[in-house]
Amino acid sequence: IIILMAGVLNCSYAQETNKEKKLKFSFSERIRLTTIDNAILLDNDADIWTFTRFRTYAGVDYAPVKNLDFRFQLGNEARVWFSPASKHPGLNEIFVNQLYINWKNIAGIPLNIKAGRQNIMLDEGFICLDGQPLTGSRSAYFNALRGDYKINDKNSITAFVSYNTDTEEFLPLINAQDPAQALEEQTNTGMGVYYKSKLKPVDLSVYYFLKHTFDNEAYPIESGINVIGARGVVPMGKQFKLVAEGGYQFGTAGDNDRSAFGGYAHFDYKLPQSIPVANLISVGGFYLSGDDPATDKVEGWDPLWSRWPKWSESYIYTLIIENAGKVAYWSNISSLNVNLNGKLSDNVSFKSSYHRLMAPEDNLSDFCGGTGSVRGDLFIIKTMYKIDDHWSGHLLWENFTPGNFYAEDADGYNWVRFELMYKF
């Protein structure tokens, strides 16, 4: 704690004295207390997982000349376990979370090039957001070369190529783990081309992605996944908006062909200011195809680089067993949902959701074990608070009641998380 406080004070002083200089420091500390209950096994006799996560980022940005900057950032996430007793606290490894060079407006043209370890999020992150699904929210980086070209005020194009390894291979670690911290199940290469256009009144995105995963001892199937898709935002007056995105996947999974579809849509209504507390209501759904066990073709949606809690922080754990141990593997799932957002005060807001979760295809695993297609009912409420420009946090509660997709003796769960975050 003393070392952490000293680091914060030192970085704060450095930041204040370097506001007009080429060197800038950044720091953040995120503390989370999480109780998972029995979200993984849907069994009330299972151990309850309760732990704190301390995620620390410390970095420096250097801009030697105009339009050229460098970023270097270290990261660490330590855990302290309260239960089960078999879990033990640990510092975990200190790793390089960001390391890149960013060159803007090259040769006076509206082209930016960013090379190195970086985060990549495109629109809502339906296809591309997280290159490190096995580290949770500790890190999400890609080892990538990215280019952004602004054609004009209404049109732009983004392209990248990436190479992400199943464990760290490129940069040194402090306090490296044994066995090594897994980043993803299989080393993979990728590329993406993302075109955005503002066509009154529609904002349109069109894209193509390619991800190639290499086999290893634990996962002997090599695959190549192509995705073509589009996203549209259609405003309907000042208060209504329709957002929809869909993608089609084709390629190979070992010796089998692939054909899958996924998408989502939500209709948003901005409530009048005369309505107290609530300010937005959204109705929508998503559909991610499942694999038909009666065919040789692979029809199950592959989430590529989107294995993150887009729709639920808790249900990503429930998906683990049916997907061969892969956390947040969004596939064979659909939802009809209603969402309500609002503000309790100037610095306290909330988001609430109800999902009716379904399964497009049967799952033959013993874990699922049901005879129907209803995964269950999921309720979510998240309260966010902002203390000042540096301090913020949230309280999140999720409740899931299993449906007939699961065995009759499957139990529901509650999932709770408290977060406090400091950053500058």
Image: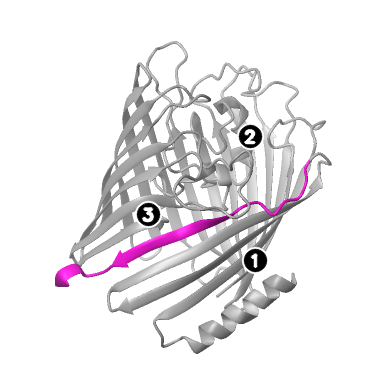
Q: Is residue 178 above or below residue 302?
A: below
Instruction: Say if residue 277 shows up in the picture.
Output: no
Instruction: Say if residue 44 shows up in the picture.
Output: yes
Badge 2: residue crowd in 10 Å (few <14, some 14–19, many ≥20): some
Marks 1 and 3 sit apart, C-alpha to C-alpha, by 24 Å
Q: Is residue 174 above or below residue 337?
A: below
Q: Is residue 8 above or below residue 175?
A: below
Marks 2 and 3 sit apart, C-alpha to C-alpha, by 26 Å
Query: Amino acid type of disc 2?
Result: Thr
Query: Amino acid type of disc 1?
Result: Gly
Identify the mark nearer the N-term, 2 or 3: 3
Residue 73 lies, in percent from the top left, at 49, 64
Relative side of 282 to 413, left or right: left
Query: Amino acid type of disc 3?
Result: Asp
Badge 1: residue crowd in 10 Å (few <14, some 14–19, many ≥20): some
Residue range highlighted in magenta: 87-108
Residue 393 numbered tag = 1
Residue 318 numbered tag = 2
Residue 123 numbered tag = 3
Is 98 part of what is drawn in magenta? yes
Q: Which residue: 51% across, 89% down?
A: 17
- Secondary structure beneath dot 3 equals loop
Q: In which quadrant of the rendered view does residue 255 lie?
A: top left
Q: Which residue: 35% across, 51% down?
A: 144
Residue 315 lies, in percent from the top left, at 61, 39
Residue 258 numbered tag = none
Residue 241 lies, in percent from the top left, at 38, 56
Identify the mark nearer the N-term, 2 or 1: 2
Number of callouts: 3
- Secondary structure beneath dot 1 equals strand
In contact (CB < 8 Å): disc 2 and disc 1: no
Q: Which residue: 42% across, 56% down?
A: 119
